[in-house]
Amino acid sequence: MKKRWHKRHVEEAFFKALMLISFAVVAGSLALILWTVVVKGLPALTWDMITQTPKGGYYMGGKGGILNAIVGSLYLAGGGTLLALIFGLPIALYLEIYLENSRWGRWVRLTLDVLWGIPSIVYGAFGFTVMLSIGLRASLLGGIIVLALLELPIMTRSMDEIIRLMPAELEQASFALGATRLETAINVVTRQMLPGIMTAILLAFGRGIGDAASVLFTAGYTDRLPNSLLRPVASLPLAVFFQLSTPFPEVQKRAYASALILTIIVLVISLGSRWLAGRLSKYVVK
């Protein structure tokens, strides 16, 4: 008995130490990344970088900024996230309310999991091929569509897992009151998962705004502000890539400043979504 008791405590201590080490590695990696971006990017960050577009010779150390990339990234990620939400939310509700744990439901979830794991460069190559076949050039519209395809499985599976955590009694009570499946999905399930919707949107938006491979061929790049869905648009990840690719140290420092701006945008959206999720939690039955 004592030997078995001792063995359990040894196992518990081992896994507790393993969890602490894992946490330290993850937290340390995050701290190191943030420290690198802040230390190298903050000295090069100026007001002109945020408020101006690139001027002549910007990538050789000239004047200007990355306003075009900031606005372009928000347009691309915002449009892609909205388009993914339009399709992802009905799919998640259909999975839970109609398919549940049926054979078709398992196949749909497996398909979404596979799509989630596909590298973003594959989405970019697929989008580029389709755009060539229909005569669409690199543009804001092409970037939005590809980012929506990239974000759709992430958002849908996140919502699906959140919905599956909802107490089954809520659905049963709704059906007992005479509500249809559609009415239950819209009036009960959607309200119950409002905070989870915000989490899924944030997860998808963060993936979209930080992705470079999928928009490299589909959205293109330009030093101008986006003014049309059918024209190329800049993005922050590509701005970082192009600035780091130059041999000029001053421009390379600006790349870290661009990365810092991207980090701040994601942080602000994360904090804002958490605040909104807290406000929406009043609709959740606990």
Image: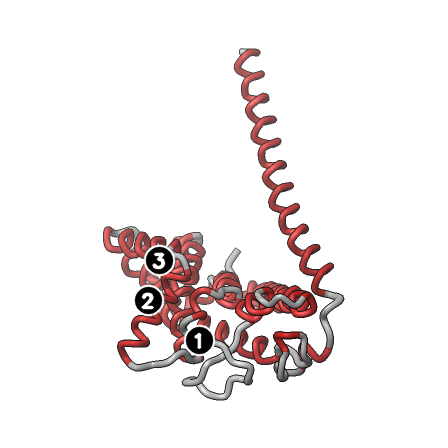
The spot of residue 235 in percent (x, y) is 53, 73
Residue type at mark 2 is Phe
Identified at 63% across, 78% down, the residue is 58
Say which residue appears at 66% left-offset and 81% top-offset.
64
Q: For the residue carrying disc 2, how many other residues have a C-alpha within 10 Å: few (<14), some (14-19), or many (20+)?
A: some
Question: Could you give the CA–CA distance between mark 1 and mark 3, rounded to whole angstroms?
Answer: 21 Å
Q: Which of 216/85 is in front?
A: 216
Asked if disc 3 and disc 2 are in contact, CB closer than 8 Å, the reply is: no
Res. 162 image quadrant: bottom left
Residue that numbered label 2 is attached to: 126
Q: Is residue 137 above or below residue 184?
A: below
Q: Which mark is residue 115?
A: 3
Residue type beneath disc 1:
Ala
Task: Name the mark nearer the viewer: 3 or 2.
Answer: 2
Q: Earlier in the sequence, mark 3 or mark 2?
A: 3
Which numbered dot is residue 219? 1
Secondary structure category for the residue under label 2: helix
Scheme of image coloration? secondary structure
Quote the CA–CA distance across marks 3 and 2: 13 Å
- Mark 1 vs 2: CB contact within 8 A: no
**Sequence-earlier tag: 1 or 2:** 2
187 vs 270, left or right, is left
Whole-percent x, y for residue 99 in the image:
28, 57
* Spot occupied by residue 199 in the image (x, y as percentages of width and height): 52, 61
